[in-house]
Amino acid sequence: MPHADSSSLPCTVCVDELSGFLRDIRAARAAAGTPAVQARIAWTEAYPGGRGGLQATTTQSLGILSGAGWTLAAPASGLPPNDNAWAAQVHVEPL
């Protein structure tokens, strides 16, 4: 099972890469007729971004990870601000 623990949630660029990575693994396993892999990512703080918030973690980032199949885990203090409609669509397990 792919698993990642980090103090900081990935930036938006890394979220796209991690999502694509898991989708590729699942597609290859499906083509081979093997069961889907489970994946979990855990963190303690949202990435604030660099230079004025560039590539900061957002609730949309969490939605992209979740939509790709990642199970998400973080403390409430580690979540980005509920700044858009994605916040209601994302489930993050308590850490």
Image (cartoon, rainbow, N blue to C red):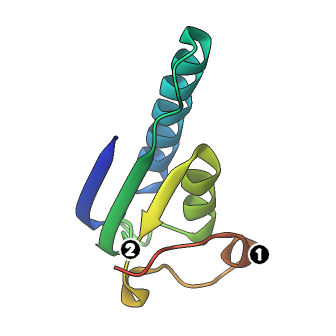
- Amino acid type, label 1: Ala
Q: Element under label 2?
A: loop
x%, y% of residue 39?
42, 46
Asked whether, in this view, residue 12 is left or right of residue 33, the answer is left
**Residue shown at 34%/79% (left/top)?**
95
Closer to the camera, 49 or 23? 23
x%, y% of residue 48?
38, 73
Give the answer, above or below, for where 41 lies relative to 17. Answer: below
**Residue shown at 52%/41% (left/top)?**
19
x%, y% of residue 80?
49, 79
The residue furthest right is 85
Q: Which mark is residue 46?
A: 2
- Amino acid type, label 2: Ala
In the rendered structure, which disc, 2 or 1, sits on the residue that comes first in sequence?
A: 2
**Residue shown at 36%/69% (left/top)?**
47
Q: Element under label 1?
A: helix
Give the answer, above or below, for where 21 lies relative to 7. Answer: above
Q: Which mark is residue 95?
A: none
Judge whether residue 55 can be spotted in this image. no
Cα separation between marks 2 and 1: 18 Å
Judge whether residue 95 can be spotted in this image. yes
Which residue position is annotated with label 1?
85
x%, y% of residue 16?
52, 43
- Assess disc 1: are there few (<14), some (14-19) or many (≥20) residues with their C-alpha within 10 Å of its C-alpha: few
